[in-house]
Image (tube, coloured by chain):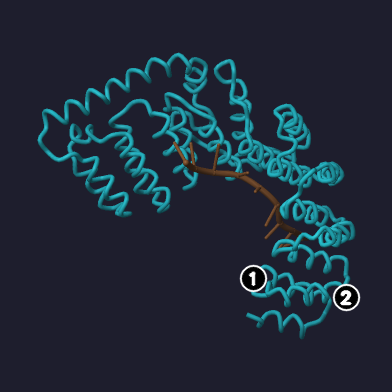
Amino acid sequence: MAVSSKTPAISLHPDHPNSHFPKSYNLKIQNFPQIFQRTHQFSLKKTQQNSLLNSTSSSTTDPNSYLTQLCLKNQLNKAINFVTSLQKDSQNNIEEETFVSIVRLCESKRALKEGSLIYSCILKLMTKLSLRLGNALLSMFVRLGSLNDAWYVFGKMEERDLFSWNVLIGGYAKSGYFDEALEMYGKMLWVGGIGFKPDVYTFPCVLRTCGGLGDWKRGREIHGHLIRFGFEADVDVVNALITMYVKCGDVGSARMVFDGMCRRDRISWNAMISGYFENGECSEGLRLFFSMRECCFEPDLMTMTSVISACEVVGNERLGRAVHGYVAKTGYVDDDSVDNSLIQMYTSFGSWGEAEKSFWSD
DNA sequence: ATAGGGTTAG
């Protein structure tokens, strides 16, 4: 399977239209520990000086408390208008914490335009981004789907922590930039000579990437990492591992991992059951569905929809009707995806009347 | 402080 066809091209800068990583990036990364230490002290001193200066020399009211109030009251537009109405030297009085509040408000309001505006103000005021402000911006841009901006923020941070790496990797993984996600994961392990230890948030992102690429070899490699780093017993990580094997078409390994779990949750069961269905092993999936119930796990919407479509594929009308009955009793019928799979199932059985009933059931 | 993980078909 061609990797490049699945991974959208990302152009990060007009100067580097075809390169995923601007050249300056490597330089920055390699010596960022030293840079970080120097600039960090420097910027701290600078902000202290600034706030000292403001509180004594200027008699105007402090913009920070006003802006913080606006953020607390959710008045994003007022806050943005206020910031942009200030002259640059007055903007200089705005503290990083205040910008953090505004950025987070933009994120929660999904306001990309406003967020970008604030970002451009911030860039005019500082050359480096602190950990807190950088992380807030990263998280905002990733959530709002602007990965180019996220990438630039990452590059401008004077210090990065595990959160920064996880957010960026997760953003790439979710948006289908699989190569970028894997590349960042690799860098994260080695950066600064020591690297960062991946955690429960890192692995699901990286595994999703391998699954998305269908890259079994990489997936297996990550499986090794996760054992080495001691996450073999983490339900969430292992759930992601199951899904990775399923997406790579290796249901056998998925099942081995599933069987080896000392604790399973609903997601583990669903991942494994639908994994069988996805790979055409419907009867095995249905068998597991029954053992799920034996193990006293309540099936949920996802279980039901996948089981219904499995009944359709296998052509098991009797079981399909039974599941329909169960679904009706438990009240899942109101769900669109359940309804759709019911309609499709009955249609494939040629039971038009039933299909129609499901259609009108809401 | 903040983040990650589960569905289906040509």
Which element is circle 2 on?
helix
Which residue bears the numbered disc 2? A318
- Drawing shade for chain B: brown
- Hey, what amino acid is under mark 1? Asp
With A226 as the anchor, is A17 left or right in this view? left
What percent of the width, then of the height, locates residue A304? 75, 66
- Hey, what amino acid is under mark 2? Arg
What residue appears at the point 61 percent right and 41 percent down from the top-left corner?
A: A173
Q: How many marks?
A: 2
What residue appears at the point 71 percent right and 84 percent down from the top-left corner?
A: A357
Q: Quadrant of residue A284?
A: bottom right
With A145 as the anchor, is A346 left or right in this view? right
With A315 as the anchor, is A43 left or right in this view? left
What percent of the width, then of the height, locates residue A243? 74, 46
> Disc 1 is attached to a residue of which chain?
A
Residue count near mark 1 (Cα–Cα under 10 Å), binned few <14, some 14–19, many ≥20: some
Q: Nearer the viewer, residue A176 or A38?
A: A38
Q: Quadrant of the C terminus of chain A?
A: bottom right
> Disc 2 is attached to a residue of which chain?
A
Residue count near mark 2 (Cα–Cα under 10 Å), binned few <14, some 14–19, many ≥20: few
Which residue bears the numbered disc 1? A336
In this rendering, the answer to whether A64 lies above or below A42 is: below
With A226 as the anchor, is A118 left or right in this view? left
Q: Are marks 2 and 1 in contact (CB under 8 Å)?
A: no
What residue appears at the point 86 percent right and 59 percent down from the top-left corner?
A: A291
> In cyan, which chain?
A
What percent of the width, then of the height, locates residue A288? 85, 57
Q: Quadrant of the N terminus of chain A?
A: top right
> What distance separates the C-alpha of mark 2 from that of mark 1?
22 Å
Q: Earlier in the sequence, mark 2 or mark 1?
A: 2
In this rendering, the answer to whether A237 lies above or below A272 is: above
